[in-house]
Amino acid sequence: MRKKLPFTLSKDQSFYESLNDWIGDTLYDELPERGFDLRDEQVFMAFQIEKALQEKKVLFAEAGVGTGKTIAYLLPAISYARYTGKPALISCADETLIDQLVKEDGDIQKISDALNLNIDVRLAKSRDQYLCIKRLEDASDFGYGDYADEVEESLPGFVFGSDSLEKMYPYGERSAYPELSNDEWETINYNPIQQCASCDVRNRCGQTLHRVAYREATDLIICSHDFYMEHVWTKESRLRQELLPLLPDLSMIVFDEGHLLEYAAQRALNFEVQSETLIKLLEQVMVDGVRETTLEKIEQLIEVHALFFDEMEDYITLNDGERYTINKVERLKKIALSAIRLADELLEEFVFDGELYVIPSYDLKMVEEYLEQYTYSMNLFATDEEAIDWMEDREGDWTLVIMPRLVTDILRNQLFNQRLPIIFSSATLSVDEDFTYIQNSLGITEPLKFSVQSPFDYDEVMKIEQHVTEDKREAVLNIMKNRQQTLVLFKSKQAMLAFKESLTPSERELFDFEGDRELSAMIRDFSDGFVQGIASYNLWEGLDLPEHRLTQVIIYDLPLPPQDPLFDAKRKHTDRPFETVDLPFMQLRLRQGIGRLIRTERDAGIVHLLVNHEEVKLQSSYEDLFPVKIQSS
């Protein structure tokens, strides 16, 4: 049901004029009367968003920590959603940010209570954040571990019972299983090879039930950047299949921590070919009754596919990130084309096998869909010179990743050329108020933009100490002796894991390491003081732990982007790659990392910046980024 506007419309004023008046009254009078701080920067930001709504344009809203960005965009977003009859979307960088936005004492609940708005807010998490019943059954049947059986036993009775649809409710989110490690979760969660439309338990699936719930939102839908970009890339194909898009029609979009949208777009646009997945799927349909011709084609494809990955290992080079550069020689292309030919022939054979009904329909559909994606991906690798590709080693499973091209053109055509108000909100969208880097990365032309500083007196509450050392491990352990609640930030997963491996068992007890279990659960335990340190390569932005919950940040290394195929592709498009790609990336990342420390007027603490003798040569490029002067240890 459509909700009432929080203000009255009159014949003498347009909606936008009335919205402008209401925002002013609310931020200057109503909220301060209820204990909220009055911040001129917040008022300015809210008025700029109202302008973007009226002009239906993209707005870069850069506002420093403490300006109250969330309330500044929530007030116009809720009003506009109720005016248009379509929900506003708040897209966050990751699931941790979502959880913090909707927590019981978060800004949404606060303004809902203060203004009696009764805000209808619903979550649309990434699909890999939900349990897959089919994969859980496989994990339990094949004895992956006790964790699979425990999850299965915890499911609602209607999942495998005969309860009516009326008794069903959403379940199966990643956050419901905090003690599972990421590796364990990834054996039972949704995987893109699953064919949900053909699944015989889809009506009892937690993801399906969540989707029904969030599509009925009247005010706000909150999702991650990854999920929103998956919605963009799959919208047309889902409509062709007579399926609903992942998200309903929207009135506007807010990208919170919007500088990270580019990386979500890249992840969503990737096509992947795993060394083991194809083989497992094909072996699954080699059942009694399958025709001999089909079995021969399966065996031939498995042989060529295995040869492709065996040969690939001779033509890859590991960089300083997770991605291996591929020397794409003609032999690899020829093997890929042979695999494509066999996959096409096998798809033709499956037409006849499908009529015999010897292969379970769900398994057959899953293999057919995967083969179609497989041939498309391998064809990109073999024939598209503009494609960007690399290899990744995922726990011993080689994965070929192909991205058709840089995402700017696709984003421009499918997102930014619509007449849809789009707000990018972050403390770090520019370098010295120059938005060129993010504009070029996303393919945005002629946006509205502004930058306002934080209202905090950093000289009184923050200290930045630089340690020039070649032994960063020892430096971290020495710093941790002060017993402060500490966030340690690493430029990459590899850097974090190398640090972890260097520690003794007793030293590791000082930290929770990202990936060991569900991230939001780790953050809660850290916030409650059950562990002194949390080590992460993703929490450069979004973490909001005021006062005693976080009093110390250690930046382990300068967050320069890796020398890998993806960033190399960006570097090829400029005459000055270090100045236009590497440095802006590092500078934005550093500003975000330091911004984790001071979140409210009551916060105080210290940032430790660890640099070796090579990194310190770049000091002139980062020392002016910070709100206080760097001190030497």
Image: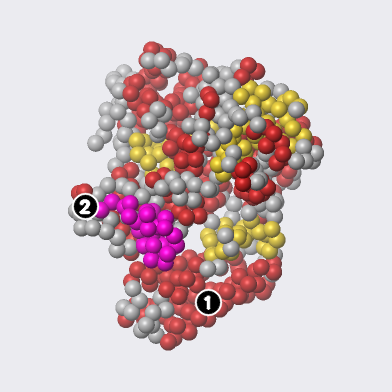
The three-letter amino acid code for the residue at tag 2 is Leu
- Position of 173 compared to 573: left or right? left
The residue sitting at 45% across, 47% down in the picture is 179
**What's the distance in space between the residues labelled 1 and 2, CA to CA?**
42 Å
Q: Which residue is mark 1?
A: 302
Q: Is residue 187 above or below residue 344?
A: above
Dot 2, how many residues are within 10 Å of its Cα: few (below 14), some (14-19), or many (20+)? few
The residue sitting at 59% across, 39% down in the picture is 510
Q: Is residue 516 above or below residue 356?
A: above
| Residue 318 percent across, percent down from the top left | 69, 58
Res 400 quadrant in image? bottom right
Asked whether residue 155 is drawn in magenta, I would say yes
Q: Which residue is mark 2?
A: 165
Q: Earlier in the sequence, mark 1 or mark 2?
A: 2
Q: Main secondary structure of the magenta part?
A: helix
Residue 88 visible in this rendered orientation of the protein: yes
| Residue 259 percent across, percent down from the top left | 56, 38
Asked whether residue 39 is drawn in magenta, I would say no
Which disc, if any, is residue 399? none
Res 74 quadrant in image? top left
Q: Which quadrant, please, contains the N terminus?
A: top left
**Coloration of the structure image:** secondary structure
| Residue 26 percent across, percent down from the top left | 38, 17
The residue sitting at 60% across, 17% down in the picture is 457
Residue 597 visible in this rendered orientation of the protein: no
Magenta stretch in the rendered image = 131-157
As drawn, the residue found furthest toward the bottom would be: 292
- Position of 434 compared to 19: left or right? right
Asked which secondary structure carries label 2, the reply is helix
